[in-house]
Image: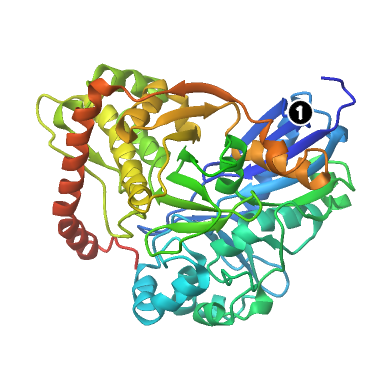
Amino acid sequence: MPMSDPLLLGIDLGAGSLKSMAITGRGDVAGIASCGVSTLAPRPGHSEQDPEEWWTALTSALNDLWQSGVDPGRIAAVSVTAGAHTHVLEDRSGSTLRPAIMWNDQRSGDEVARLSASHGESILKLSGNRISATWTLPQLAWVRRNEPEIHSRIDLVLPAKDWLRRRLDGSVATDVTDASGLMLADVEGNGWSDELCDLAGISKDRLPPITASTSQTGVVSADAAEQTGLKAGTPVICGTSDTNAETFCAGMTAPGIGALKLATAGTVSTLTPSPRYSPDVIHYPHLVPDHSYAILGTNSCASAHRWLRDALFAEVGFDGMDAKAARAPAGSDGLLFHPYLNGERSPYWDPDLRASYVGLGFQHDGSHMCRALYEGIAFSLRDCLEVLRQRDMGFGTARLVGGGTRSTLWRQIIADVTDLTIEVPEHGDASFGAAMIAGIGSGIIPGGQEAAKLIGVAETLRPDPRVRETYDKAFSRFRQAKEALTPVNHKLVREHAGGAT
């Protein structure tokens, strides 16, 4: 690439790391760098992060990016993405009031039950989504009930990516997708909802203005330039949620193509021009104009893999576990794994479900445990997919994104269990999507379907008909075992104070 070509910088805050990526206007990757971030779990079911660590990770990742040979002077625009629902609470002085409650936090289960009983229908009608512990609305209600002194000092609520972006350009704003993720916005496009804000105990003036994901919010400030190495005055584009960016850059740009994500959580998404709001499918505005994406998610995906690795297979790591899993047969000789380590979202919406191995016998070894984990997460994704299929929102081809795509075996298991043709995009990372947003917002990359031309497919996998019956039977047993264990899980969680209370 010519050294004079402008570059676009995408920054994505993930659950375990912050990643930066520089690309050209043609979609060629010029450099990648990342830095880890830690998650706090002060109580079972709680998941929090320190926002200041995000900024430290951002400056560290950018320093590594420059050290790798990327010239910061060539960055023409920058944009930021992060997981939806994670938010920062600030007081009047701009100080952070508490650690950021994460999207996978389950503490607000009691608030969800109360609000669902008293206002469930109106919340669904106003926000377009069913209330669950994932959303900011019940999390703010939890803060009001359990940390009233902190709640009384809230002056500003900012989604995670907007808090980070403000450190770059000083802007206070959010996009329509993250506004939806707070569960405080009116789905009809009427801005923040008085009724939803009242349920959270805050006023609308504590929330940022809503703008388009591709709109420019400001420029890199002199202070941010000094800390990051970026050039002062570099345009900053609003950005959006990580899944919105990932599905877009993976190629989910027209109805009929879905997207599966193997990351900290696992998700199943599809594009729709006409959202059909219901209690069992989540909807968000998409980067494709006048479209939404319907999404269902399983709470524990790569996070479950990390748990098993750290608990039993730390000495062999990811590649060793993958090799072990490949030695076990399809169906894991009857061993099942439910990945509900932190409760579950779709389709059960139950913060008090817990993980389990079922059917374990002397014939099973570590290989079976590793493969059963791959299969169990695939079954959870199929659980989500079945909801879309029942609503005639299914699809035959899906783009597969996320860190789990590193495993050839896991990719094939996903295809076999879901009976989908799986396409792995050349770039299905949210940081790539953020860089594309920076390009669209700055005018360097065309919007709409023109932007989709930058998206390529690196691999195609088709389901193996030889294992279809095996996985259909195993999926049926997976569901039966889940139903049988649900009351046991609930009793154990509540007796041992492990629930989302």
Residue under the point 45% across and 58% down: 282
Q: Position of residue 364 (x, y in %)?
A: 15, 26
Image quadrant in which you'd find residue 429: top right
Above or below 81: residue 163: below
Q: Position of residue 484 (x, y in %)?
A: 13, 53
Please indicate whether residue 204 sits to the left or right of residue 134 in the image: right
* Colour treatment of the image: rainbow
Q: Position of residue 366 (x, y in %)?
A: 24, 25
Residue under the point 90% across and 48% down: 233
Image quadrant in which you'd find residue 209: bottom right
Image quadrant in which you'd find residue 322: top left
Counting labels gives 1
Please indicate whether residue 69 sits to the left or right of residue 303 in the image: right
Residue under the point 75% across and 38% down: 9
Residue under the point 59% across and 26% down: 426
Residue count near mark 1 (Cα–Cα under 10 Å), binned few <14, some 14–19, many ≥20: some
Closer-to-camera residue (54/267): 267
Can residue 207 be seen here? The reply is yes
Residue of label 1: 26
Name the residue furthest left: 362
Closer-to-camera residue (86/499): 86
Can residue 314 be seen here? The reply is no
**Quarter that holds the N terminus:** top right
Q: Position of residue 467 (x, y in %)?
A: 24, 24
> In what element is the residue under mark 1?
loop
Closer-to-camera residue (254/370): 254
Please indicate whether residue 275 sits to the left or right of residue 107 in the image: right
The amino acid marked with disc number 1 is Arg
**Quarter that holds the C terminus:** bottom left
